[in-house]
Image (cartoon, rainbow, N blue to C red):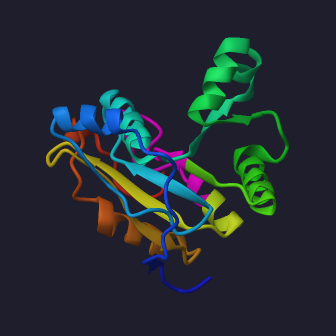
């Protein structure tokens, strides 16, 4: 780990197969999507701000428009329901056993390491605020996954003022929480959510 969070500038790995339909739907409502590709086969994407249910709709369309193969956390019990489980896997859900002694972070780090060993892509996308309501800061689970797995972090934002979904800033973390969160805030703090007053401060939750 370095003493600063280093910005990564490629080389970029291409996304998957993009959806022209999803991009067209976004364009109809004035949205544009920006992303050059991914700097590695495994990593964590932090999505900010999260202030509205519309974030999921816009974010899902952006995922399809880019052809991104993303994972997200979901309770293991959801995967035991046949049709729901299949749908969750299709969307990229990662089964998490909350009773496991390794915990949420440990399970995900192990899954990411296994994907690396198999040469598979594994990017975990998380809204670190954890709620659409105003909170005192970010949950740090996804950040800890990136630190422990030694993978880069992508900073994604949904800016409702400019109608932009962007995934262009990628960082190699320092491992120092204060340093890394300062780098997150430098890129994300001025982005405007649908309900701007509900955006949480970019700092670890007490």
Residue 174 percent across, percent down from the top left: 55, 78
Looking at the picture, does residue 68 appear above or below residue 28? below
Relative to 159, is 174 on the left or the right? right
Q: Residue furthest right?
A: 101
Closest to the observer, 55 or 91: 91
- Asked whether residue 108 appears in the rendered view, the answer is yes
> Residue 26, image x and y in percent?
25, 36
**Residue 38 drawn at (x, y percent):** 50, 63
Which residue is rendered at x = 17% and y = 32% of the image? Answer: 28
Q: 47 or 114, which lies in front?
A: 114
Magenta segment, prevailing SS (helix, strand or loop): loop
In this rendering, the answer to whether 132 lies above or below 174 is above
Q: Nearer the viewer, residue 185 or 166?
A: 166
Is residue 137 something one can see in this rendering? Answer: no
* Residue segment shown in magenta: 125-144
Indicate the position of residue 168 as horizontal and vertical percent values.
Answer: 36, 64
For residue 89, which quarter of the picture? top right
Q: Is residue 108 left or right of residue 70?
A: right
Quadrant of the snapshot with the N terminus: bottom right
Task: Identify the residue at horizontal 58%, vertical 49% (top origin).
Answer: 124
């Amino acid at each position: 780990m370095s003493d600063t969070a280093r910005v990564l500038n490629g080389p970029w790995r291409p996304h998957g197969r993009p959806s022209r339909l999803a991009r067209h739907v976004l364009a109809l409502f004035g949205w544009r999507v920006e992303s050059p590709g991914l700097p590695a086969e495994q990593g964590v994407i932090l999505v900010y701000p999260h202030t509205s249910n519309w974030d999921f709709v816009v974010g899902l369309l952006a995922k399809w428009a880019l052809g991104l193969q993303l994972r997200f956390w979901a309770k293991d019990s959801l995967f035991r329901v046949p049709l729901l489980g299949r749908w969750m896997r299709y969307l990229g859900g990662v089964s998490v056993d909350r009773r496991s002694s390794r915990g949420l972070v440990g399970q995900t780090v192990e899954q990411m390491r296994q994907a690396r060993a198999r040469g598979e892509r594994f990017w975990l996308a998380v809204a670190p605020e954890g709620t659409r309501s105003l909170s005192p800061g970010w949950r740090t689970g996804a950040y800890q996954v990136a630190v422990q797995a030694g993978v880069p972090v992508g900073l994604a934002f949904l800016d409702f003022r400019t109608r932009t979904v962007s995934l262009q800033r990628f960082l190699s973390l320092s491992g120092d929480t204060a340093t890394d969160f300062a780098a997150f805030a430098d890129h994300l703090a001025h982005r405007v959510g649908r309900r701007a007053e509900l955006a949480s401060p970019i700092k670890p939750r007490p």
